[in-house]
């Protein structure tokens, strides 16, 4: 298969929640494939540090510090990108948080915060990106980050599970409305990844043992192992792939 199918040179990718963790790993992968990347987060200092780390490797990087759950902030951020001449060809909706608490102890504000961060943000940012892709008649790529919980529930993470299940269906809704405009909307469902957000779980012998025993690969995933899937979905290689969620989980969902 020609290498050019996966070449992202000349394209600009916005990755939300990309100052660290999975978002940073995905942004770096897209940059390595030739894309100019726009990092996003709410911590301007950490965002600047992450951008400098990528620039030191020779990558073209911009930053856009804004709250993905704030409709006005999202609109203003895209207006600034427009003014700077940055047309987003690739959007990765990665921003997310986790909250572990039994349903009966969960407050409405806690529920709302997780849903807004993990699901509503993908709608808000996706809407602004798609409006511009449609107006430019240039097509584009939208990659939403789902989870194993897009398919299966686990106790104490109900709002996260609801949000990631919603990501799967939002991706299909985006496809239903935007595929005719040459926009491919798909999702990635990571398995258990060794990230900063999962440090407590990694250090919990019982949970660590459960992940390794439950996963056919017998280990946690690494953030960089999302690189190939992200590049594929962002590139011309996936131009007729729409509404799919690709699980990168070491085989966890494949077995009982």
Image (cartoon, helix red, strand yellow):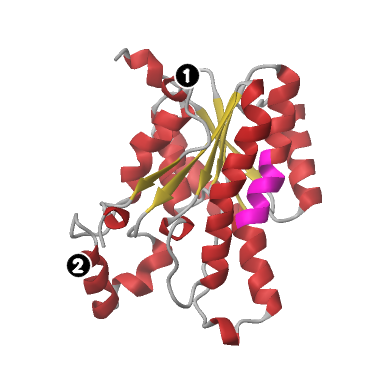
Label 2: few (<14), some or many (≥20) within 10 Å?
A: few
Q: Residue at x 58, y 60 (%)?
A: 163
Count of all numbered marks drawn on residues in the image: 2
| Residue 228 or residue 105, whichever sits in front | 105
Residue 71 showing in the rendered view: yes
Up/down of 173 relative to 207, above or below: above
SS under mark 1: loop
Eyeballing the image, is 253 above or below 86? Answer: below
Task: Specify start and end residues of the magenta stretch as a single range.
Answer: 119-126
Residue furthest front as drawn = 256
Q: Is residue 187 above or below residue 149?
A: above
Report the residue at 74% width, 46% height from top: 74
Judge whether residue 125 is colored magenta.
yes
Residue at mark 2? 213
| Residue 84 makes an appearance in the image | no
Residue 17 versus residue 147: which sits nearer the camera? Answer: 147
Where in the figure is residue 104, as x and y percent of width and height?
A: 58, 86
Residue matched to label 1: 9
Q: Residue at x 34, y 73 (%)?
A: 201
Calculate the distance from the C-alpha at mark 1 to the C-alpha at mark 2.
Answer: 41 Å
Q: The N terminus is located in which quarter? A: top left
> Is residue 17 rendered to the left or right of residue 174?
left
Q: Position of residue 178 (x, y in %)?
A: 66, 29
What is the x, y in percent for residue 220?
Answer: 26, 59
Q: Position of residue 41 (x, y in %)?
A: 60, 52
Task: Indicate whether residue 32 is drawn in magenta.
Answer: no
Circle 2 SS class: helix
Q: From the viewer's perspective, is 62 left or right of 74?
A: left
- Give above or below for 34 relative to 130: above
Secondary structure mostly taken by the magenta-highlighted segment of the chain:
helix
Please give the name of the residue rendered at 66% of the width and 68% of the height, measured from the top-left corner: 113
């Amino acid at each position: 298969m020609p290498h050019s199918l996966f070449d992202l040179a000349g394209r600009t990718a916005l990755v939300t929640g990309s100052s660290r963790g999975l978002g940073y790993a995905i942004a770096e992968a897209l940059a390595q494939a030739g894309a100019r990347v726009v990092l996003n987060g709410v911590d301007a200092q950490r965002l600047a540090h992450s951008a400098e780390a990528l620039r030191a490797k020779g990558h073209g990087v911009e930053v856009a510090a804004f709250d993905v759950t704030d409709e006005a902030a999202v609109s203003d951020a895209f207006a600034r990108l427009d003014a700077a001449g940055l047309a987003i060809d690739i959007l990765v909706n990665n921003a997310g948080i986790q909250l572990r608490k039994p349903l009966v102890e969960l407050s409405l504000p806690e529920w709302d915060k997780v849903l807004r961060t993990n699901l509503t943000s993908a709608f808000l940012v996706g809407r602004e990106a798609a409006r511009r892709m449609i107006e430019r008649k240039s097509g584009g790529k939208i990659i939403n980050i789902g989870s194993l919980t897009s398919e299966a529930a686990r106790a104490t993470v109900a709002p996260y599970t609801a949000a990631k299940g919603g990501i799967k269906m939002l991706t299909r809704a985006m496809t239903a409305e935007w595929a005719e405009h040459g926009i491919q909307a798909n999702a990635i469902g990571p398995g258990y990844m060794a990230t900063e957000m999962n440090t407590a779980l990694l250090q919990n012998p019982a949970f660590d043992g459960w992940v390794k025993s439950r996963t056919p690969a017998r280990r946690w995933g690494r953030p960089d192992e999302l690189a190939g899937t992200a590049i594929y979905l962002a590139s011309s290689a996936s131009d007729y792939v729409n509404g799919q969620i690709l699980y990168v989980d070491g085989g966890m969902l494949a077995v009982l």
